[in-house]
Image (cartoon, rainbow, N blue to C red):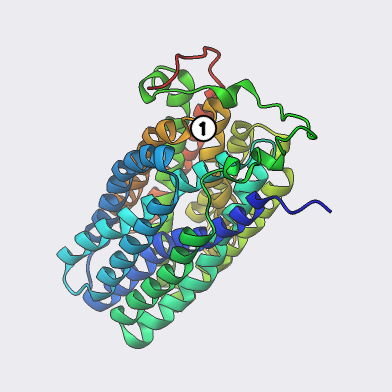
Amino acid sequence: MRRIYYGWYIVVACNCVAFITWGVGIFNQGVFLGYFAEQHGWSTAAMSAGATLFHLWAGLVGILVGRVIDRRGPRGILIAGAVTLSAGTVGLGLTSELWQLFPAFLALSTGFASIHTVTLGKIIARWFIRFRSRAMALATFGAGVGGALLVPLNAYLLDRWGGPAGGIALAVITIIAIVPLALFVFKDGPETLGLSPDGDHTDDTAATPVIPDTELRDWTASEAMRTVAFWALSAAFFCGMLAQSGFLLHQVLFLKATFGLVGAASVVTVTTIAGMVGRVLFAIFGDRWKSRDVAVLFFLLQASGFILFAVHPEPWSLVLGSAIFGFTMGVVVVLQPLATAECFGQPSFGRVFGPIYMWIRIGSAIGPLIIGLLVTATGDYRASWITVALMLVAASIAVRWATAPLRVPAAAV
């Protein structure tokens, strides 16, 4: 009886990392900011500046992470990410003055970038080729679980015992979930176990796996930047994450007026559950289509949810729009490393995806700030949701240009 391919154990371990990456690093930002708005009356625009710093710094860290993980593997990066993310949650929990948000967000950002899609994407690209879409979708299924469990938990702790309780609890969960896996489960590629991607054995009794030419190309960052594919991916996911990160930060603030803090956190749970459904469907069907074609569909579907917010902001439509957003949200994130790997292969994945990730994080940084400024200027979120819907339409147009470059560059140095 053939043993289960170890790559699938890696997928399970990646789920535990994703549980923390999104559950702590993304979804709970809005919960903390909703808590600060209630406790201190800080303005939406001022707090959004902290999230802008978070995403800009994550982009810079992501470039370094991409280079390190190409050379040294994932273990050290995962441990460093867990420690710095934990420091960020403790910092947020102890925040009592507005300026303290910024160092806390810097620490949170460093940890987030170290265990986000640059790292997870590289890990999955090393272990899978034929089943990469399925593996990446399943590897990030834990993101929705993290949001579904950790958002209401943190909201309850903040509401009942205040900031330190929530921050310390998230830090402890982060360390317990990631550090043992980094030390004992993650391996630096299938070749360390005598395997090839997807579980193909390389001994004399097994057929040599056929590896597509695109997987064998080795790009430098500067070579990749001279291709249309690089800028198509950068533009598409810049626009997409501008919309996505803006909503994630402002979701609780937007919904709190209708549902209250704990009720808004419950709607976030609906969002994350819908995200799990989206990932499952993508895991089943995603290998059948090119990533860019799926991205077009999901960008446009996500835009429809924001239009619903803008034209019909009733309680039922807020829940439905949040569910539509959640259904598309996880898949859009999964598509970022998948589309990059389709265009540029895995040997230089971290080297190429790092700069793309920088553009993703710049979009993520601008989104919360634009929404915060529009809310301050107009007094509600309607103009914000129309703006982000237009950005998603632009993303659906840009991603159509993300096709694998034909020229095979010289080997990277």
Q: Quadrant of residue 37?
A: bottom left
Disc 1 crowd, CA 10 A, few/some/many (<14, 14-19, 20+)? many
**Left or right: 115 with respect to 403?**
left
Q: Which residue is mark 1?
A: 340
- Position of 67 relative to 110 (above/below): above
Q: Which residue appears at 60% of the width and 57% of the height? A: 141
Mark 1 residue element: helix
Residue type, mark 1 in image: Thr
- The reply to whether residue 264 is in sight is no
Q: Quadrant of residue 78?
A: bottom left
Q: Which residue appears at 55% of the width and 43% of the height? A: 189
Q: Nearer the viewer, residue 132 or 361?
A: 132
Q: Which residue appears at 38% of the width and 55% of the height? A: 112
Residue 1 position within the rendered picture, expressed as x and y whole percent measured from the top left? 84, 54
In the rendered view of the protein, which quadrant contains the C terminus?
A: top left
- The reply to whether residue 361 is in sight is yes
Residue 318 position within the rendered picture, expressed as x and y whole percent measured from the top left? 53, 63
Residue at the front extreme, as displayed? 204
**Left or right: 168 with respect to 389?**
left
State how many labels appear. Answer: 1
Q: Nearer the viewer, residue 337 or 373?
A: 337
Residue 75 position within the rendered picture, expressed as x and y whole percent measured from the top left? 43, 53
Residue 24 position within the rendered picture, expressed as x and y whole percent measured from the top left? 42, 65
Residue at the top extreme, as displayed? 407
- Position of 311 relative to 341 (above/below): below
**Left or right: 288 with respect to 1?**
left
Residue at the right extreme, as displayed? 1
- Position of 230 relative to 252 (above/below): above
